[in-house]
Image: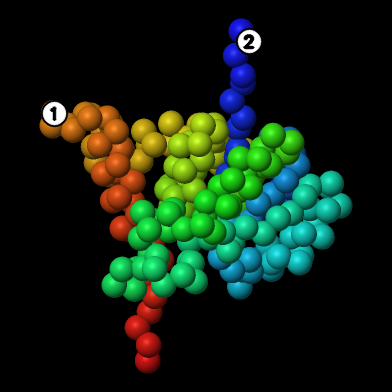
Amino acid sequence: MESVKKRTVYTIGHSTHEIGNYISLLKRHRINAVADVRSVPYSRYYPQFNRENLTDSLHVHSIEYVFLGKELGARPDNPECYENRRVKYRLLVRTKLFREGIEWVRKGSKHKKIALMCAEKDPLDCHRTILVARELVRVKLDVEHILADGQAERHDIAMKRLLEQLGTGGHRDLFLTKEELMDKAYAAKERRIAYSKKESA
């Protein structure tokens, strides 16, 4: 029986790119749909990535824009996703809205070449990798991260880089399985990047 090829979903950070360079990165990887996973689809310093401006720019190049910030954003409205005013990814992934977002990407990847977009340049500094991509891998999708230089980094390679970044050097702990070590790495990065609500004045 012929094996079914796994579908690939991409991620990209808009960072400080000029819009032309950003679109060139998308075209290089033949992306035809951008799913915006920013909770707030606007940029104070880079207005070319404000929702309306970006939608218009992508449309010119026949690239679809979809806003998934409500479903897959890092700053959920649901208070049940917070502990001590900080988002907890283990709670967020259980919500109906988040699961609907993952399912949209899963189904959409059958017909479109999708890039999940957020702001951060390095995928390891963003929830698109530490939260969303992790769940996409769990539903049997391949994930690749489009870097600022145009190269695509496979998610498993990004995770090796995460282990090195956190000081493990990729070496396995004698008392932890590979999966447990990776769970610790995800948790450590989450503590650094997860959104925290400011105290009221």
Mark 1 and mark 2 in contact? Answer it, CB < 8 Å. Answer: no
Name the amino acid, label 2.
Glu
Label 1 sits on a secondary structure element that is loop
Task: Farthest residue to the top: give it.
Answer: 1
Can you say which quadrant of the picture contains the C terminus? Answer: bottom left
Q: Which residue is located at x 61 percent, y 21 percent? A: 5
Between label 1 and label 2, give the one nearer the viewer: 2
Q: Residue 43 in the image: state x and y as whole percent.
A: 62, 68
Task: Farthest residue to the bottom: give it.
Answer: 201
Q: How far apart are labels 1 and 2 at the CA level?
A: 39 Å
Seen in the image, is 141 located left or right of residue 60?
left
Q: Which residue is located at x 30 percent, y 50 percent? A: 187
Residue 184 or 123: which is nearer the viewer?
184
Q: Which residue is located at x 46 percent, y 58 percent? A: 95
**Residue at which label 1 appears:** 174
Dot 1 or dot 2, earlier in sequence: 2
Q: Residue 38 in the image: state x and y as whole percent.
A: 57, 61
Seen in the image, is 107 located left or right of residue 190?
right
Label 2 sits on a secondary structure element that is loop
**Residue at which label 2 appears:** 2
In this rendering, does residue 37 appear at all? yes
Badge 2: residue crowd in 10 Å (few <14, some 14–19, many ≥20): few
